[in-house]
Image (spheres, helix red, strand yellow):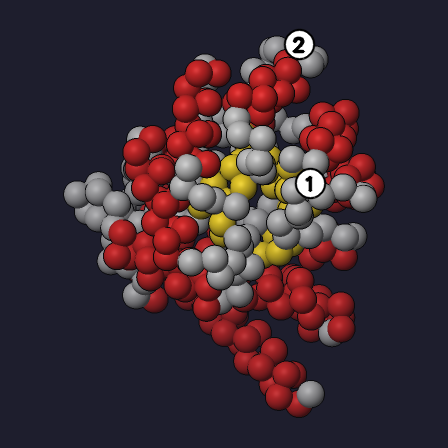
Amino acid sequence: MASAISGIFPVVITPFNDDDSIDFDGYGRLLDWYLQNGAQGLFAVCQSSEMQALSLDERVALARFTMDHVKGRIPVVASGHISDSRDDQLAELTAMAETGVDAVVLVTNRLAGKDDPAGTLLSNAKALIDALPSDMRFGLYECPAPYRRLLSDEELRWFAESGRFAFLKDVSCDLDVVKRRLAIVKGTPLAINNANAAIAYAAMQAGGEGFSGVMNNFHPDLYNWLYTHGTAHPLLAAEVDEFLVLSAMSEAMGYPKLAKRYHRRIGTFASEHTRVVAYDLEERHWAVDAVLDQIMAGADRLRGRIAALAKAA
């Protein structure tokens, strides 16, 4: 039986040098930043990593670097599962498993096309699982690109009861759906880890097992505090939740380049170069730096209040 992987799981971005090569020195500093700021696990090689724009060798190198750098301090899961054909998918998943990650993540939209009949997703998933080592454990990711493929209740139930799946990164963005899914997986090793900031705290309160959204690239420590201490401090938790929801609106301002600008500003790495956002942030999103200023200042104010609360206790 797989054990649930839960908690605050940042979706790891990929720093590039200006020549388009991966900045592994900056990547190491980024991993340290996650560790220092409340990450309880890492989702390496995912959409935020720009996996669709990375070669298989690059995807494997990122996962292996992550494992070597983290050294077992927190769990690491990885996907890099982007191909259409079963043979190519099997090669990708096998290569990712050989890095030693704690779970290899299946992308739901790679298991069935938009127009495929019912049963296709489970049939394809079972074929892949049967071809992979029996001791491998898996996760599931409802990656929204190139299209969002949500699991049906029947599909989720099968994955949960198989004992091979440790978590679902839920991209339903619907609290009622999250609650229904929590009921379906109850008593199984599969954790529901929501990815939507607008319902992050409500999903935690309903029993959701963490948060794995893009805003963990800005303030994972605040999500960690909500997850671990929010219930004990409802008034401050409500304020933190409101700040996090409003801050998450900035995702539309050129993410993941926006997150790279944030990390360039705090000194994690030097370049905000990305393979998936071709435009200049200021040309498309006016006053983007003023938005980042406010997000950073608001987060620091809340950190101060959390620190004062802890000191008073």
85, 126: nearer the viewer: 126
Residue 14 place in picture, x, y as percent:
35, 47
* Residue 43 location (% of width, % of height): 49, 47
Secondary element type, mark 1: loop
User: Which residue lies at the image location 58% right of the left edge and 31% below the top edge?
Assistant: 134
What is the x, y in percent for residue 312?
Answer: 66, 90
Categorize mark 1 by other alpha carbons within 10 Å: few (<14), some (14-19), many (20+): some
Q: Nearer the viewer, residue 69 or 149?
A: 69
Q: In the image shown, does 255 or 23 lie closer to the viewer?
A: 23
Amino acid type, residue under disc 2 in the picture: Pro
Q: Does 227 appear above or below 137?
A: below
Left or right of 206 in this view: 263:
left
Q: Which residue lies furthest to the left in this view?
A: 19
The count of marks equals 2
Q: Can residue 64 be seen in this view?
A: yes
Q: What's the amino acid at mark 1?
A: Met
Look at the image and tell me whether residue 199 can be seen. Answer: no
Which circle marks residue 248 in the picture?
none
Q: Name the residue under label 2.
A: 117
Number of the label disc, if any, that sits on residue 1? 1
Nearest the viewer among 64 and 167 is 64
Circle 2 residues within 10 Å: few <14, some 14–19, many ≥20? few
